[in-house]
Image (cartoon, coloured by chain):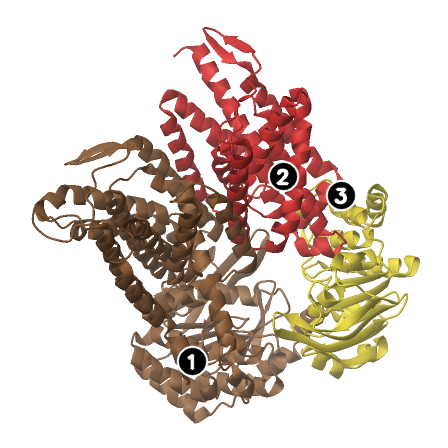
Amino acid sequence: MNFSQKLYSSAGVVFPAFGTIAVLASSGLIDPYLAYVATSWIIFGLLGLSLDIVWGRGGLLSLGQTAFYGLGGYFGSVIAINMAPVTGNTLIWSLPAGAAFGALSAAALGYIIFYARMGSLQSTILSYTFTLLLLVLTQTFRLDVGDAVIGGDNGMSNIPGFVLGFGSAAEALTPNSAFATVVVIAAVLYFFTRWLMRSTFGRIVNCVRIDSQKTELLGYDVRKYQLLNFAYAGAIAGIAGAMFGAWSNYLNPSVFSVSEAISVPIFVLVGGLGTLAGPFLGALIIGGLSFWLGGGSVGGQTTLILGLILVLLVMYLQNGMLGGLTLVWKKFLPDSNEAARLAGAVQIDTDVLEGILKDAADHAGPAKDVSSTNLFKQFGGVIPVNKISRHFTTGRPYSIIGPNGAGKSSFLKTCVGIYKPEGGKVQLGDEDITRSQIFDRVKKGLGVKNQKPQVYGELTVLENLWVAAFSRTRNDADALVICNKILGMLGFEKQSGVEASALSHGQQQWLDIGMVLCLAPRVVFLDEPAAGMTNEETRELSLLVRTLAKHTTVVVVEHDMEFVRTLEGHVTVLHQGKVFAEGDIQTVRANERVLDIYLGRREHV
Amino acid sequence: MELDYLATVLLSSLASASILLIATIGLAVVFGLMGVINLAHGEFLMIGAYAALTTTKLGIPYILSIPVAVLITMAIGAVVEILVIRRLYGRIFDTMLATWGISMAFLQLAVLIFGTVTPGIGMPQYNFQIGDYSLAGYPILMIGVAALMMAFVYFLMTKTVYGMKARASIQEPEMARAIGIQSARVNTMTFAIGCGLAGFAGAVLLPIVPATPSMGSVFVIKAFLTVVVAGPVTLTGSALAAIGLGGGASVTASFLTSVAGDAFFFLITATLLWLYPLGISAKWRWKM
Amino acid sequence: MFKIKNATGGYGKTVIIRNVTLEVKAGEIVALLGRNGVGKSTVMRYATGLIPAMEGSVEIDGQPAPDASAKRAQMGLGYVPQGRYVFPRMTVTENIAVAAASNGHDHKAAVAEAMKNFPLLVSKANDLAGGLSGGQQQVLALARALAIQPKILLLDEPTEGVQPSIIDEIAGILKRINKERGISILVAEQDLDFCLSIAERAYVMEKGSIRLETDRDSLRNDKALQQELLGV
């Protein structure tokens, strides 16, 4: 790695650290009025960070961040007003109180959004409605809490400023020192957030954004991660709100206003979505622009210019300042995906595979049977799964075949939990899992590979495998050991740092299969695994499936009769949602009625 | 409670629901037929109002100023579609943000051109008498205007070739192209019509809602929520949502406070979104 | 009359079809055979311009086809997609009328003609297309494609999910329009009987490429070939 590459990979630490130091060094020298105004930019940057966590990392454009900001501000300030006379220091009260209230209100809203599994547009609108509801309600909300007077649209005044000292003699900081304090707090929160987003938690939040269904199929309770992430962002917004209260010494319902709500996505977009540092840059640029253009926050042509900037950004610079810079910089770095083209053909070494499978059996227990009883699924007038009863066990692979529209994939999806059946039941081992959540089934030993390769395109090959392995081990080091074994088996050692999106279709299929193996499943469902593979790859796949079936229960949905023949297992023919024929492949191939449904001949059907 | 009071409340609530519906229809057309949420809709309403106001000031009768407002907003709408919206199809959040930017720019331009305060044209004087209560006639007239607008849009979308093309383009975009529909042109037309309807709303509501640069934002939020609650059967869904939400809010406001009315609006919206994530009309089998 | 030359295409970066070349002569019915996932639908979508060409070109009636799907339709390319994709919230009449009107034909006449050709649709004329059964939707999709007055008609799995009586009816209609109006037809199918009953010539696809070209008789008589090609 050369200097540029090293700097690139740690840019998120180096530049913000330099920035913080530079700002702190100059904080004592600048004009107090500028310091006062600039403090608000940092606070807005922090508010932007909270949206970036939810939107850039979590994938939900929330227009509710100003709601958590306002609520945190109000609550933190109420506590600070009452407690400041006791301790002097205001921040030890307002910041934790703001964080707690912001997190709680975000968790309440997030619970509705994520646990009702709302669509993205509805989630955005609901978060916006929440903000608007607060805007309306706070207009007339009057309440005295000790010394604090919440006065409806008159707002709440007498909020103490930034006081660091303790005791009744402690004085509020000068604008310059308050600025420095806010910068330090923001920097601490930024670096903590960056660490969190690179930790296992943050990595899984990333995965949920990229492909939420796949993440659930890897055994993660995605809603829990989404909710936690949302609540964490709510806490950040709450802290920002509490600092805003201390900065302006006054809060009124306009914090919930429409223009506040939209300014946050603008900060994020200007700086760069998902960059974490971007929102600060965005708030600085927008704030600075307004400062020089219009003298202060509003006035002049600021709105006009902001509006045009937003339009141009959305159209031409979607990645924002930092995102755009990153792309340019990346062009000058060696292509890390170069290795994708050098990958050789996959060769399954049965000894290695057996080793992995035995190892998995030691950790995850023996293979489990899976069975369906009178399983029934209906879409309007179509019944793709019509009372199918099957029992699958270990020893040899089970294939499910049938012409187009026979209900093969639907049967598989109903067993896995992607479709909820209207009748019948599904059992895994001795347990009835008919009503279990998908991630729960996976934890109990179900492994699924869907028809299309589901890989996280922006993550590297190794990271893809790690997410799967970590789901089982819950331990970083153990997960890496498993990943390396699977990498070796797939012949991907040299490609471990390649982004999955750079792999060919066939390679992605193998990576997906590798991810399923990392889970050490006790039952494996494969939906058309041979689709899009070359003849050589199909041969290797057949070997893998046969070896797999010796150790676990394997069910393959397949169209390719030739591939099914090489599996030498049990075959079930589905037709119009029902079991049409079964037996080994020779029996099925000799069955005239099966030929009829395949060829569309109508004599027997 | 007296019957005449109740009738007054109901009638004026229906009138305010109609006003909401008038302000919403254009947005509903654009969302329902293009899948675009136009957050600058309120500013088109404002442009329509100023166009009508300026035209009347030039001595042209108010009634003739309305078509002028429609033409001006349609033209601006077509330009916005060609310059911005067209490049963002399929990116619903990006179009939302871009139209938000356009709305900010238009708002500020209006401030620059017209200043923040402008005189209204005054409400045509006509009052109703129901029992002991007197009602202004013009808002009641809006019930009829809303019904006419609905009928017009329904006719346009179901009986004309353009309407069929527009509906085909949103229902199955690929097949629409495959059978020879030039969806880009259809979309420009749809967006222009949506903006024209906003301009019509601004002009026709001018006697009730005086022209100010920020008048659009008063409507756009509620109009926007109404459309999202309505779902895929745009026109009927929006009418029902406007009457339920707008009318309900207005009834609540007349018995309690205006804040309670707004709170009612937002709370019911949130509840409906929770219960019907794809809109209340997601399972209806109607054309529009 | 209709040619696809060296077609290479797919979705995003994924190549699904490679170097596919085929031709349908004037007044001919040609089948495109192959089992699920070999790329038949992708060839069809390539031909209609719904997926961009990575390489290769399409020729309609001796003219190079423009990129835009709508322009190809106006040149006389009719398309019945797999899964039918009728406009669900439009009536049967509107589905047909919009197709005719978009290509400059009189839509009332087009609807009248369709009702004559497809008596099945008459009683459903004012029903929303989304409420029709699969077979009825298939017939409607065919009627819609014919309303643009095509010179070449592409059909993608017209028998999928359709009951046998309607399959026979569709086969009859196709043969008739081919004979009476001289419309060339390219049909992608897995249903061998259906193809054998209408097509004189067939291309067989495997793994995204044309593997061979054959005629009706050799396909009908060669059981081994049938089994191998269709994966039975």
Q: Secondary structure at mark 1?
A: helix
Q: Is residue A234 above or below residue A79?
A: below
Mark 3, other Cα within 10 Å: few <14 / some 14–19 / many ≥20: many
Tell me, yes or no, whether the two marked residues, 2 and 1, touch with CB atoms within 8 Å: no
Q: Which mark is residue C93?
A: 3
Residue A344 or residue C25, whichever sits in front: A344
The picture places residue A136, in percent across and down from the top left corner, at: 36, 34
Task: Check the residue under mark 2 and report the chain it is in.
Answer: B
Q: In the rendered structure, which amino acid carries the disc numbered 2?
A: Gly
**Callout 1 crowding tier (Cα within 10 Å): few <14, some 14–19, many ≥20:** some
Number of the label disc, if any, that sits on residue A5: 1
Q: Amino acid at mark 1?
A: Gln
The answer for which chain carries disc 3 is C
Residue nearest the viewer, comparing A199 with A190: A190
Identify the residue shown where x is 42% and y is 60%: A56
Q: What is the CA distance from the residue labelled 3 to the residue labelled 1?
A: 63 Å
Chain C takes which shade in the image? Answer: yellow
> Mark 1 falls within which chain?
A
